[in-house]
Amino acid sequence: MLTLKGGLARSLPDLRRFERGLLVLAEVAPERLTLGQGVFFLYAGWFDLLGTPATYSDIEEAVGGTLNLSIRTSYTALLEEGRRRDGKRQAGLGWLCSQVSAKDNRKKILRLTPKGRKVIEKVKAAIEDGDGSEP
C-alpha cells in the first residue's frame, strides 16, 4: 500500500475534489473544448460566482501566468454566439458573455450566462460534495 507523508498527503483531498469538478466539466463539455479553455471557464465562472466578475487580464494576473498562451484567442469559444469584428458569425458555447465595464468602458467583463451558471453550479456541487475521500 502506498503511504503518503507531508504536504502531498494533506493536499490529496483537495486534488480529489478538483478531480470531481473536472469530471463533471468533461461530462457536460463538447469534445472540442480544450483543457485550457475548461480551466479558463472555471476561473471566469468562479470570479463571477464570488461577485467579482473579471476581465481576461484580471484572470491572467490572478492565476500568475499559468494560462496557456493560446487561451487569449481561443477563450472566445466559451462566449455566446455573435459576430466578430470582421462580420463573420462566431459560434460559441454560450457559457460566458462579455459586457462593457460600468467603471471603464474600455474593459470587457466576463460574466456567466444562465447556461454557464448551470455548468459551474454542477462543477461547484461536485467539488463541495463529500470530504474528498472519494473522487
Image (spheres, rainbow, N blue to C red):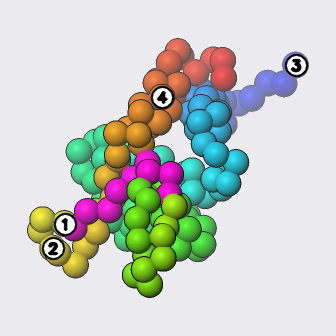
Q: First in sequence, mark 2 or 4: give its number.
A: 2
Q: First in sequence, mark 3 or 4: give its number.
A: 3
Residue that carries the numbered disc 3 in the rendered image? 1
Disc 1 residue type (three-letter): Ser
Q: Is residue 129 left or right of residue 103?
A: right
Q: Nearer the viewer, residue 1 or 67?
A: 67
Q: What residue sits 50% from the left and 51% below the top?
A: 93
Disc 3 residue type (three-letter): Met
How far, Cα to Cα, is label 3 from label 4? 33 Å
Segment tinted magenta in the rendering? 92-100
Secondary structure found at label 4: helix
Labelled pair 2, 4 in contact (Cβ < 8 Å)? no
Q: Which mark is residue 81?
A: none
Secondary structure found at label 1: loop
Q: Which mark is residue 122?
A: 4
Q: What residue sits 84% from the left and 24% below the top?
A: 2
> Badge 4, how many Cα within 10 Å: few under 14, some, many 20+?
some
Q: Nearer the viewer, residue 35 or 66?
A: 35
* Residue 65 visible in the shown view: no
- Frontmost of labels 3 and 2 is 2
How far, Cα to Cα, is label 1 from label 3? 54 Å
Q: Is residue 116 above or below residue 102?
A: above
Q: First in sequence, mark 1 or 3: give its number.
A: 3
The picture places residue 88, in percent across and down from the top left corner, at 48, 76
Q: Which mark is residue 104?
A: 2
How far, Cα to Cα, is label 3 from label 2? 56 Å
Residue that carries the numbered disc 1 in the rendered image? 101
Disc 2 residue type (three-letter): Asp
Labelled pair 1, 2 in contact (Cβ < 8 Å)? yes
